[in-house]
Image (tube, rainbow, N blue to C red):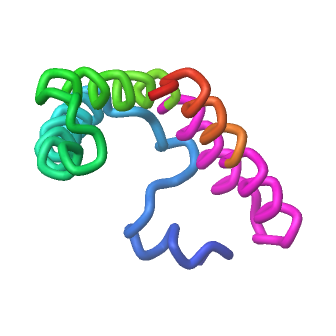
Amino acid sequence: MSADPLADSGSAPAADDLRVEWRTALAIAAGLICLFTVQNSVTTPVVRPDQTFGDVFVRQVIVWGVWLPLLPLIVANAKRARASRPLTAWIVVRQMYTATWIALLHGATSDT
């Protein structure tokens, strides 16, 4: 029996098995683009009446299109955290720091 209880249960992949499934990522991004386009097209006229459905759609394509190239960075960060056992306060702080920079990078590059 290994020291990691998740490794024995089969409920979580090993750190080496984490990778980007691009077909799944593209399908999820397409679904989220549709979902948030519809949601924002309903709520946007109240806040910004000059926005058309097409404008909202393009904005969502940019947001989720920028997210896709960042996905390998996110998975690499998760892989590094998964390989770092036992979990310490320093690992949690490092994950939060990295996640903040990824979020800032996404916001700066999508600029919507």
Residue at 45% over, 35% down? 19
Residue at 29% over, 47% down? 47
Comparing 105 with 72, the one in front is 105
Residue 41 picture location, percent across and down: 15, 42
Residue at 18% over, 43% down? 45
**Relative to 5, does residue 40 appear above or below in the rendering?**
above
Report the residue that reaches farthest toward the right: 90
Quadrant assignment for the C terminus: top left
Q: Residue 87 falls in which quadrant of the image?
A: bottom right
Q: Residue 107 falls in which quadrant of the image?
A: top right
Residue 106 picture location, percent across and down: 55, 31
Residue at 48% over, 32% down? 71
Residue 88 picture location, percent across and down: 83, 71
**Relative to 91, does residue 51 appear above or below in the rendering?**
above
**Residue 87 part of the magenta-drawn span:** yes
Quadrant assignment for the N terminus: bottom right
Q: Which residues are magenta?
A: 71-99
Comparing 38 with 50, the one in front is 50
Q: What is the total number of numbered labels drawn onto the structure image?
A: 0
Residue 64 picture location, percent across and down: 35, 31
**Relative to 94, does residue 2 appear above or below in the rendering?**
below
Q: Is residue 29 left or right of residue 82?
A: left
**Residue 54 part of the magenta-drawn span:** no
Question: In terms of secondary structure, what is the magenta stretch mainly?
Answer: helix
Comparing 41 with 95, the one in front is 41
**Relative to 1, does residue 26 appear above or below in the rendering?**
above
